[in-house]
């Protein structure tokens, strides 16, 4: 359960304990949801990836939408050698999650991404700059359980970079703030420091 594929996807030793109830069951293995679309999923496993659907038991017992798999979730999948796709039988506990409210008679929570370690909040320093929008994103990042990092781009299109950076630093508090220009290959090394093997980042 700690082979290269799973390690790259972010598998850690603590996950091994969570999957112990299924360890002796034939055809069951850990995986991570890479893509999700209308109850169809693409799951990465130890030796590659394959398509999967929800098992009948999981679908029947899920009382809320947030209990269904989302991109980034670690899951237990069942797949026999002769089958062309597998079935997700369980969702392992989440370390972090990004969610949105789904309107209806009763407001439900829909998880759109899970188990993100670092969330990069990207904002340009041009005319699209908005400190209020940044504050909303910072709140979402903190509430998710992931560690937020602010990336400020397009410094060449700003009339006063130091002033805007100071404004962002004041709003961000203890959240790291970096200025970078991918076009000029500046600051990319700062981003790379946050993304190491086994860590999941999102923009």
Image: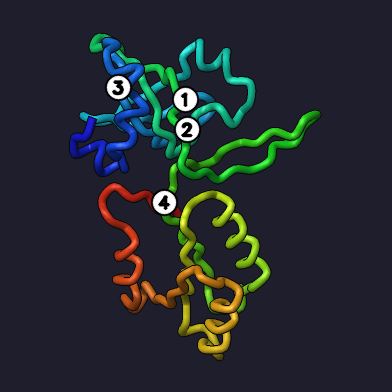
**Pointer 4 local density, CA inside 10 Å: few below 14, some 14–19, many at least 20:** many
- Determine which residue is flagged by label 1: 40
N-terminal label among 3 and 4: 3
In what element is the residue under mark 4? Answer: loop
Question: Which of the two discs, 4 and 1, labels the residue nearer the N terminus?
Answer: 1
CB under 8 Å between discs 1 and 2: yes
Position of 83 relative to 177 (above/below) = above
Percent of width and height locating residue 99: 59, 43
Instruction: Quote the CA–CA distance across marks 3 and 2.
Output: 19 Å
Q: Position of residue 88 (x, y in %)?
A: 42, 20
Disc 4 to disc 2, how far (Cα)?
19 Å
Q: Percent x, y for residue 147?
A: 46, 57
Mark 1 to mark 3 CA distance (whole Å): 18 Å
| Mark found first going from the N terminus, 4 or 2 | 2
Q: Which disc number belongs to residue 117?
A: 4
Q: Which mark is residue 36?
A: 2
* Alpha carbons under labels 1 and 2: distance apart: 6 Å
Give the spatial CA distance, label 3 vs label 4. Answer: 23 Å
Above or below, 175 against 25 in this view is below
Element assignment for label 2: strand
Q: Please identify the residue farthest to the left as the structure is shown.
A: 3
The numbered mark, 3 or 2, whose residue comes first in the sequence reads 3
Q: CA distance from mark 4 to mark 1?
A: 25 Å
Q: Which residue is mark 3?
A: 29
């Amino acid at each position: 359960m700690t082979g290269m594929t799973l390690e790259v996807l972010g598998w850690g030793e603590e996950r091994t304990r969570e999957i112990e109830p299924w360890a002796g069951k034939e055809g069951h293995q850990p995986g991570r949801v890479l893509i999700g679309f209308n109850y169809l999923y693409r799951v990465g496993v130890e030796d590659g990836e394959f398509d999967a659907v929800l098992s009948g038991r999981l679908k029947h017992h899920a009382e809320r939408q947030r209990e269904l798999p989302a991109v980034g979730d670690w899951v237990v999948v069942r797949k026999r050698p002769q089958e062309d796709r597998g079935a997700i039988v369980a969702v392992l506990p989440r370390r972090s999650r990004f969610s949105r409210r789904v309107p209806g008679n009763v407001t439900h929570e829909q998880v759109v991404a899970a188990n993100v370690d670092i969330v990069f909040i990207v904002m340009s320093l041009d005319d699209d700059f908005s400190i209020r929008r940044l504050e909303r994103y910072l709140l979402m990042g903190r509430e998710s359980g992931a560690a937020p990092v602010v990336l400020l781009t397009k410094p060449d299109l700003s009339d006063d970079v130091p002033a805007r950076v100071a404004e962002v630093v004041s709003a961000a508090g203890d959240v790291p703030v970096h200025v970078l220009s991918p076009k000029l290959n500046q600051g990319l090394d700062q981003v790379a420091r946050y993304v190491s093997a086994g860590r999941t980042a999102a923009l």
